[in-house]
Amino acid sequence: MNSANDPILLTPGPLTTSSRTREAMLRDWGSWDAAFNRMTHSVCAELVNIVHGETDYVCVPLQGSGTFAVEAAIGTLVPRQGCVLVPNNGAYCARLIRILQRMGLAYVELALREDQPVSAAAVEDAFNRDSRISHVALVHLETSAGLLNPLDDIAAVCQRHGRRLIVDAMSSFGALPIDLRQSGIDALISASGKCLEGVPGMGFVIVRRSELEQSEGRSPSLALDLHDQYVYMQKTTQWRFTPPTHVVAALREALDQFMAEGGQPARGARYTRNCATLVSGMKALGFEPFLQAEVQAPVIVTFHAPRDPAWNFAHFYSAVRDEGYVLYPGKLTQVETFRVGCIGAIDADDLRNAVAAIDRTLVRLGIRVR
């Protein structure tokens, strides 16, 4: 699907984009231009529709990476006296904890293995043990391993106990089904450069309108104040500060392609085919996935590194890069791994070709996998 001569990015974002998405960035936009502001409005409206936010939720876009949006959501939506439960089964969960520490907000860590999804029962037990907990910050898809946490089950527990739920859906939004109707989800966070297949540079928070309206003056940051951003955009149709105009234009084009493909069901099905092709091909070469199939999300797959003394990830990465494919290093703390993404403007044929390139690389470098 990628017609360019550039390497195919088998990463969790930035990722390979279509030529149409790249071409959308060739025009310059004025930040006060009415046409650009209409574009921003249309993007935000469509993002809410993807997750069935209807009239109860609003989308607040924010300049920067996805982490900017995560920090903005926490700083704006969690009161200073709040306490946040963080199920921790990977690097992005740990980053949530670092954000809370920097803000001086109270938190409770629910420590889990890197291959262990959080359960609704464990969250409920945490509520019963600690009455201070007012919010849960959940990473839906922990990208450090590709682990999928059970969002609907956690949302139901939070709703039943009257706890607020903030979801980092960075690597799941657009690929996996998320339905905000009657859910216990108060805020959903993602970014332009993930499964929507835009380019990086814009985060966004889809937040329950009633929650956002109660958060005035709460953020410790000016730039990351979601309430201030929302109110200003409502009044003026403009961003408060210089917007990432080319990123928004690329996302508008990417969303058009997303809908033409068939929306989330079709996007998720393509990624599932990509993942199945990748896993079966890599297993045939002798590589073993880190996760069990039932908790593996079809976005990025972590593989155990070979035990061969000839293995060196940096050399392997460079050689595969020379073949036209960019892989990703492992991000686990306990075992040596590497990661291969299944997302972006790529299809199963691209994954088959990538596996063939990896096979040629192993032979060239003299690495035994089995």
Image (cartoon, grey):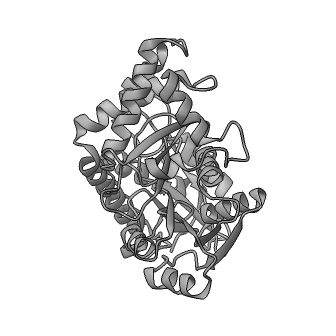
Residue 339 appears left or right of 280:
right
Residue name at image x 41 percent, y 46 percent: 195
Residue 64 appears left or right of 49:
right
**x then y, percent, for residue 274:** 33, 54
Q: Nearer the viewer, residue 362 or 267?
A: 267
Disc tally is 0
> Splitting the image into 4 quarters, where does residue 20 fall?
top left
**Which quadrant, please, contains the N terminus?**
top left
**x then y, percent, for residue 34:** 44, 13
Can residue 259 be seen? yes
Residue 338 appears left or right of 161:
right
Can residue 200 be seen? no
Residue 260 appears left or right of 238:
left
Residue name at image x 53 percent, y 36 percent: 230
> Splitting the image into 4 quarters, where does residue 316 fall?
bottom right
Q: Is residue 121 above or below residue 309?
A: below
Residue name at image x 42 percent, y 39 percent: 197
**x then y, percent, for residue 210:** 46, 50
> Splitting the image into 4 quarters, where does residue 228 fall?
top right
Residue name at image x 49 percent, y 83 percent: 124
Q: Is residue 215 above or below residue 277?
A: above
